[in-house]
Image (spheres, helix red, strand yellow):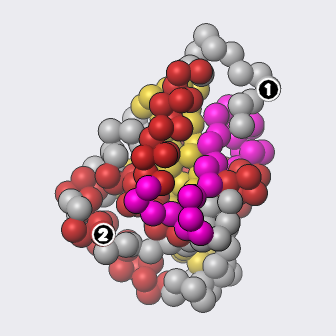
Amino acid sequence: YVPEDYDASRPWPVIVALHGGSGNGRDFLWTWVRDAKRAGYLLVAPTAVGSTWGEVDELGILDMLSWLRGRYHVAGDRVLLTGLSDGGTFTLVYGLAHTDVFRALAPCCGVFHPVNFANGNLDRARGTPIYLVHGAQDFLFPVQRAHMTRDTLTAAGAHLTYRELAALSHTYPRSENAAILEWFADLP
């Protein structure tokens, strides 16, 4: 999504939004369009190659951002990576692996994938701004797993904002979009 008032004379921040397992970017895009338009963001919502995110998708996302930078005036230091469920899980995997590409991460209702321990992502978490959202009623990824993720990232030195929503199950908390973008805009 490119806002209708796009003006190439200024750099534009970007939201990269990763859908959940068995989802697709075409549908997940709509969780962010209204907020991207209101706040003046370019928005990318790719679709995983398989039924969920994996190793092959990481390069595809980086290629998409490179393509976007070649066609639009992207604020290279203002790229936010976010996602739901598996998209939230891989927000941490890809985002921590590429802290030079993504300014901040906002995983929603995901978990801390074991690959983060093996690939050095915990070392890269130090100083990384992360807005972690999870539902207290999540049936797929129980909130205790979110507590583990919160505690692991905090111990690693991430600049973590943790939001536990009491009434939220395993679904996208669209009501958090404005808060996420406000948090992101306030980052130095």
Q: Residues within 10 Å of mark 1 (few under 14, many from 20)?
A: few
Residue at 34% across, 54% down: 96
**Magenta stretch: residue 43 in it?**
yes
16 with respect to 123 (left or right): right
In the rendered view of the protein, which quadrant contains the C terminus?
top left
- Residue 57 in the image: state x and y as whole percent: 48, 54
**Image x and y of residue 103, in percent:** 41, 41
Element at badge 1? loop
Looking at the image, can residue 151 be seen?
A: no
Q: How many marks?
A: 2
Point out the stretch of residues depicted in magenta.
32-56
Q: Residue at x 22, y 68 (%)?
A: 118
The residue beneath circle 1 is: 4
In-front residue for pair 33/177: 33
Label disc, if present, on residue 175 of the rendered structure: none
Does 15 sit above or below residue 135?
A: above
